[in-house]
Image (tube, rainbow, N blue to C red):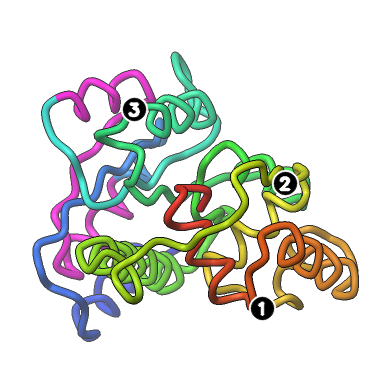
Amino acid sequence: MDRSATIATAMKEPSMKDHKRLLLIDDDPNLILLVKDYLEFRGYEVVTAENGREALEILEQDIPDMIICDVMMPEMDGYTFVEQVRQTERTSWIPVLFLSAKGQSADRVKGLNKGADVYMVKPFEPEELVAQVESSLKQTIRWKEHQAKGGENGSRIQVPFDVQLTPTELKVVQFVARGLANREIAEELNVSQRTVESHVSNMLGKTNLHNRTELARWAIENQMA
């Protein structure tokens, strides 16, 4: 990425300038500088950390609207960091975007299973990063509005208390909650679309829900996504 061209492009494009605060974690100072500059020109406030341990110290004092995190870092890697974020009630809701040089399907699946909401492979286009950030923030806003209203008709989705999903079904329902189509989920998991459709059908049967929308809402309400 050419820094001057990147920033020039950023200054020309409109954005969500509502002072959203982002926590950017990476041990590469050049990437930190480039991404921080780009996001700040897009109207975001950016706090930075060099590794997961330093980021946890920041989270003790301040809660960002979103976290952008490298995977491979010294002292505490992204996997360990995100697991701790998800286990803490005050931070478990924060959307997390993983940045990684590893782009194999297995790496993407591992990152998402560890708790990331988005997985991007380096090198990436700055415009795509911003698009992913804005998409995640909008989804969080929708989720908070949904929670504030108490859900559709003022009640939560009801499913049998003993529903158990397989590891693969859990991966699929997380993608469904993020709004991905079956074709896109199949590409992410490196399986056929028919296989994804089968998993969705099985989950609808287990939960007694009627459609993907209800399935997504159930996953969000129960913090599976």
Q: CA distance from mark 2 to mark 3?
A: 23 Å
Instruction: Say which residue appears at 58% left-offset and 36% top-offset.
Output: 114
Quick check: 134 left or right of 100? Answer: left
Instruction: Say which residue appears at 35% left-offset and 38% top-offset.
Output: 92
Q: Position of residue 38 (x, y in %)?
A: 26, 63
Q: Secondary structure at mark 3?
A: loop
Which stretch is magenta?
33-60
Q: Which residue type does callout 2 highlight?
A: Leu
Question: What residue sits right under mark 3 in the picture?
Answer: 88
Q: Is residue 123 inside the magenta stretch?
A: no
When the figure is inspected, residue 218 is found, relative to residue 25, above or below; the finding is: below
Q: Nearer the viewer, residue 2 or 131?
A: 131
Q: Which residue type does callout 1 highlight?
A: Ala
Disc sitting over residue 16 in the figure: none
Q: Are marks 2 and 1 in contact (CB under 8 Å)?
A: no
Question: What residue sits right under mark 1 in the picture?
Answer: 181
Mark positioned earlier in the residue sequence (2 or 1): 2
Q: CA distance from mark 3 to mark 1?
A: 30 Å
Q: Position of residue 137 (x, y in %)?
A: 30, 64
Q: Which residue type does callout 3 highlight?
A: Thr
Disc sitting over residue 165 in the figure: 2
Q: Secondary structure at mark 1?
A: loop
